[in-house]
Amino acid sequence: MPTNEELKKIASQVRRDIIRMVHQCQSGHPGGSLGCTDYMVALYFHVLHHNLPFSMEGKGEDMFFLSNGHISPVWYSVLSRSGYFPTAELGTFRKLNSRLQGHPTTHEGLPGVRVASGSLGQGMSVAIGAAMAKKMDNDAGLIYVLTGDGELDEGQVWEAMMSAAHHKVDNMIVTVDWNGQQIDGATKDVMSLGDLDAKWKSFGWMVLHMNGNVMQEVLDTLAQAKALTGKGQPVVILMKTEMGSGVDFMMGSHHWHGVAPNDEQKDKALAQLEETLGDY
Amino acid sequence: MLTDFPVTGKKATRDGFGDGLLAVGQQHPNVVALCADLIGSLKMNAFIKAFPERFIQTGIAEANMMGIAAGLATAGKIPYTGTFANFSTGRVYDQIRQSIAYSDKNVKICASHAGLTLGEDGATHQILEDIGLMKMLPGMTVINPCDYNQTKAATIAIAEHHGPVYLRFGRPSWPIVIPDTMPFVIGKGIMMQEGTDVTIIATGHLVAYAMEAVEKLKEQGISAELINIHTIKPLDEEIVLDSVAKTRCVVTAEEHQRNGGLGDSIAQLLARKNPTPQEYVAVNDSFGESGTPDQLLLKYGLGPTNIVDAARDVLKRKR
């Protein structure tokens, strides 16, 4: 099991992968990808019980669903760095005939992806279905879901929240990437989320909070969330992150939500991120 | 009465779904059912009573239901979703498109109260665009059975087909014309009556009306061939092409918009393979309204006499 320091090194490489992938095709979503890197690295390299080769049905394993599919660069990097497919394939991101589509899909057979996402608000519902199947099968594996905060604008998310509590889906840990930004600006300006903590609690969820860009805090909170499973209520972690985390000029606004760096910006970003595992 | 397919009773196609669901649940431990607050309307009570642990009530939240179904399928279950056709398609099109069709999930979307025959509830609930919506999705199988027996058999058969299926049926009590012993083969049309002058291709409730039309045409000295196309996608091209090669004109009949329905599938096939004069018996770019099923089908031009008239019209254009 990698230590906190080792996980940080992996996260640095993943951030390099994100910058290089998005730069290479001059398209994609670096901001949220960088913000969620620490969570995704903690999940795949420390928390998730998962086996290779990849199995769609994931019997006896934990399963992860990415609802905010536009942060595919971080997921592809983490999947590849944890052995799902060769890192060289990261260079095909968003290019013709690639398995690494702009938004994740099962259609091209990429190991690690269980459902297409990108059109927002759908991932939690799918995850609830997988969690219910595990309960029917007496499978102890847990379901992890990541969703964006802007994504909470979608009504389906609230349908899913209500149903997870009603059906006591207590084998699922949802994390909200609460970076406060979406394409058109700050979430408070585009569509106010109000008191998120109170909203989830009033829907019948157990609510935890963490800073998603402090590795030890991510590990501790995910462990705490896991300890809360099996108690008759679904669990959500409201995860504060900084969009663009790890690259100074990409932080602090929504600008880098879906913009690719130019050559100069790419070099400037990579200079801030240590190459720890070797670039793809 | 067609000699090979006598009317043996009357029952709703949705009853066929309910009885088929129970049977397929008994056959397949992986079959699970979901419903968005319409258990009674979808006739799902028998399944729920037999398999309470394999039923999920989602409340009036169809988008979430489609997502949950996709997740269940991901983990190896065979989910059957149940709600009205309107809420099974248009309301949740993007959920079906992304989480089910594009993701190749083995979900069976079972849709009752399709079309005008939903009746008195009116146009808000009478979807007439669902076949078009669903057949446009890559990989989606689209089935519209004609009676109780065919719906029951189809409900059982789709469990053996891996992939997303849209199964469309309806509300009213309707003539039973398919023998209960007849196997349901996805993508295989049924020759109901052989004839030489004109081909009538019907789906769903309009098969019974087309049978009446065949009798009326016979009285007028016209020999009509009747094909029941229960699977609109994939289409049984062979049975259609063989028939029109003989009759050289065709009438399509369906409880759906002209745009995007069975008629368009037939027209597309014939345009490519054997251009043939065709008349549509279908709703002509209009919403429905409140009324009884029979009243509505007549008012919107879907009655047996409309099929007879369409046959006589297309015969005039035959080359």
Image (tube, coloured by chain):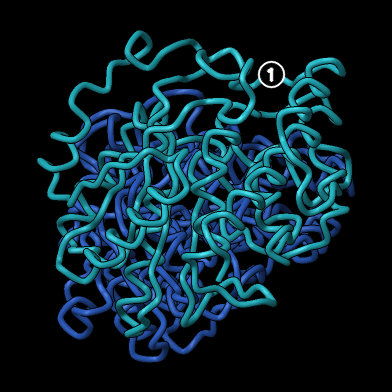
Q: Where is residue B276, by image quadrant?
A: top right
Residue linked to disc 1: A259
x and y percentages locating residue B60 in the rendered image: 21, 45
Name the amino acid, label 1: Val
Q: Which residue is drawn at 28% across and 30% down?
A: B124
Write down the chain letter for disc 1.
Answer: A
Q: Which residue is drawn at 71% across and 29% down?
A: A272
Q: Residue at x 64, y 15 (%)?
A: A249
Quadrant of the frame with the N terminus of chain A:
bottom right
Circle 1 crowding by C-alpha within 10 Å: few under 14, some 14–19, many from 20: some
| Chain identifier for the blue-coloured part of the image | B
- Mark yes or no: residue A52 visible: yes
Judge by depth and name the residue closer to the eye, B314 or B291. Answer: B291
Would residue A35 be found to the left or right of residue A229 on screen? Answer: right
- Mark yes or no: residue B174 visible: no
**SS for callout 1:** loop
